[in-house]
Image (cartoon, rainbow, N blue to C red):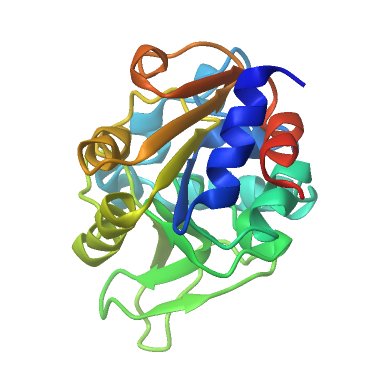
Amino acid sequence: MPDSLKEARQLLAEARNIAILSGAGVSAESGVPTFRGAAGLWRKFRPEDLATPEAFAHDPKTSWEWYSWRRGIVAGVQPNRGHFALAKTECTVITQNVDGLHQRAGSKNVIEVHGSIWLLRCTQCRREWEDLSPAIELMPHCKCGGLARPGVVWFGESLDPNVWAAAETAARSCDVLIVAGTSAVVYPAAGLAPIAKAEGAKIIEVNLETTSLSASVDYSFTGPSGVILPQLLDR
């Protein structure tokens, strides 16, 4: 076992408060397509055609067809070893993913900064409800009659201030922040590592390749999160 891995394992074993920022790379190992990778979803679809308030207002049926397709993909995959390693660790999971795989693996304290693909929100009364059916009806409606939209944060929208406040609090209060499966370029989530570091936390990066964050972390491990996270966290 490399010395850096031994040191990081010891650091995590002694930490009182661990947080993780997870990105698309963690779910990609379960078979969920990423948005920015070589086979990313945005290579086939333009985000402004599908994932903006304006696009939904212009053509909600096409938007819902796409999200229904995505829900079907996510429903057909399973959490991977990285998800389960985190679920067995007492930590706060701050995720940019909307697929719910952390919860399916057993993680209890999950902050979904970009919302959830399984959440529906009425465009009229703003009521929210969960629908876990992969084959959701196209153009679902609320009890009030209003058209529902996916409960995710679209391009051009702000994060929920309460959710973001919880994410910032987790970053400020942790002893160790693990940043896994994210390119660390999407703000404001990419700003959580600097926030944690400024408060004295140690930063551990796990990614398939080096990122703009790599030079400033305490430990950087290159490889699949489904392999490295269990090595770091499993006892």
Which residue is at 57% across, 70% downward? Answer: 108
Q: Position of residue 113 (x, y in %)?
A: 37, 53
Quadrant assignment, res 216: top left
Q: Is residue 48 above or below residue 215?
A: below
Look at the image and tell me whether residue 201 can be seen. yes
9 and 96: which is toward the camera: 9
Q: Is residue 91 left or right of residue 128?
A: right
Quadrant assignment, res 156: top left
Quadrant assignment, res 225: top right
Q: Quadrant of the N terminus?
A: top right
Which residue is at 72% across, 45% downward? Answer: 73
Q: Is residue 80 left or right of residue 83?
A: right
Q: Position of residue 185 (x, y in %)?
A: 34, 23
Q: Give the residue furthest to the bottom.
A: 143
Which residue is at 73% across, 33% downward? Answer: 29
Q: Is residue 74 left or right of residue 149?
A: right
Q: Is residue 175 above or below residue 36?
A: below
Q: Is residue 136 above or below residue 183?
A: below
Q: Position of residue 117 (x, y in %)?
A: 52, 57
Look at the image and tell me whether residue 134 can be seen. no
98 and 19: which is toward the camera: 19
Q: Position of residue 47 (x, y in %)?
A: 39, 30
